[in-house]
Amino acid sequence: MGQEKKADLNRHSDFHVVATPAELKEMVAVLEKEKALGIDLEADSMYHFAEKICLIQIATEKAGFVIDTLALEDISLLKPIFYSTDIQKIFHGSDYDIRSLYRDYRMRVNSLFDTQLACRFLGMQETGLDAVLFKFFDIRLDKKYQKKDWSKRPLPDEMLAYAAKDVLYLVALGKLLENELEQKARLFWVNEESRWLSRLKPSANEAEPLFLRFKGAGRLDPRELAILEAILKYRKTVAKQKDRPMFKIFSNAAVLKIVKTRPLTIGQLEKTGALSRKQIGMYGEALIQKVQQALAKPGAELLRYPHKRAPMVKPKIRRRIKALKTWRENKARQIGIEPALVCSKVVMADLAAKLPNRVSQLKEIKDMRTWQKKVWGEEIITLLRETDGRRN
């Protein structure tokens, strides 16, 4: 990337903070005339029980905006921008952002282009924004504010500048990556994958028992699960009362250690090394009580982990899956991308089970993308026929 291009990228290093309805309206009037926008957001998941978006950063080719979503009661003026199919929205690693926008504002994003996904489809090994900007523009991002509390107000100027910088180069990066993808005839792959990403919604995390979402719970017996569930409920209650993330009350590793050692006194809890002296002072007595109550629970009331038995797979289906995996590995190596991008395990299993005989029958493979059918449909059908020893 030459000096002239870098100068172009740096010409809009200034940005505008949007914190009032009037400023929001003025910004929207600018954005609705654009063809492409770079977008990012900052949230406060490291500091609060229920995370929320604190800033939305948007950049055009010539201007940058940082929207203070905590200062604005209503940002619905932005919805037509995000919903528009005429304005491309460029994110880098959009999964979390798409889910967060829907969670907080029921906001949908149309015409999404994910530059991290684009990098993966171009076969790049390092796809973090810092690495990508350095590769293409010789620009380094300062990540020292990455884990700061974005819900604090007022935010220092240097934090606002940090937030703005993440999006200032996305429009230029998007154009560059689109050109490279076009040359490799892979742009329509990424456009379709981006459309799938744009439909993501946050998962519902309110279901009980809580141990179903705890890593390692499947290896515990019913009594241990009772202790685990009691401790998880207690931690969630405390975290909600204190408005802090649950991991900042005590960690999952500490929870598991308490479950395994079953301390019945403060002295026994101290010997586990699971908690600090301060944590024991705050939560020790309650935790001991939770362990005692779980141990006293009648056996008939205990829950078992609902292990799902893997369905029996017929030998001929296993043979097809093996053939598809080999094909996928070879194809990925040939074009220089990750095997999972070529074809997912879910799609391979579905192909092997349903055994489509014509490309038109691939519509029955629910998670298979249109681009995969177009590029490799005939090849996959032929592979499945040959694996089964069938003729055309």
Image (cartoon, rainbow, N blue to C red):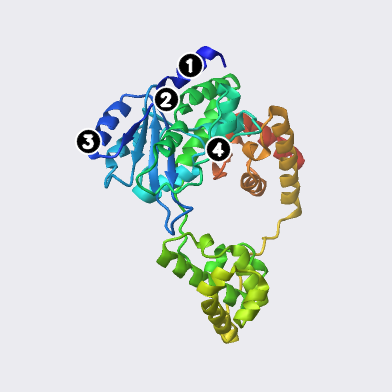
> Closer to the camera: disc 2 or disc 4?
2
Compare marks 2 and 4 and give the one earlier in the sequence.
Answer: 2
**Relative to 145, is 333 on the left or the right?**
right
SS at circle 3: helix
Q: Amino acid at mark 3?
A: Ala
Label 4 sits on residue: 369
Q: Amino acid at mark 1?
A: Ala
202 vs 389: above or below: below
Compare marks 2 and 3 and give the one earlier in the sequence.
Answer: 2
Q: Amino acid at mark 2?
A: Ser
Q: Where residue 196 sits in the image (x, y, percent)? A: 49, 40
> Closer to the camera: disc 1 or disc 3?
1
SS at circle 2: loop
SS at circle 4: loop
Q: CA distance from mark 2 to mark 3?
A: 23 Å
**Relative to 31, is 44 on the left or the right?**
right
Residue at 56% in and 85% down: 297
Q: CA distance from mark 2 to mark 4?
A: 39 Å
Residues at badges 3 and 4 in contact (C-beta under 8 Å)? no
Residue at 58% in and 27% down: 134
Q: Where residue 233 sits in the image (x, y, percent)? A: 49, 71
Residue at 41% in and 67% down: 241
Label 2 sits on residue: 13
Label 1 sits on residue: 7
332 vs 279: above or below: above
Compare marks 1 and 3 and give the one earlier in the sequence.
Answer: 1
Label 3 sits on residue: 22
Q: CA distance from mark 3 to mark 4?
A: 43 Å
> Closer to the camera: disc 3 or disc 4?
3
Compare marks 3 and 4 and give the one earlier in the sequence.
Answer: 3
Mark 4 Cα within 10 Å, few/some/many (few <14, many 20+)? some
* Residue placed furthest toward the left: 22
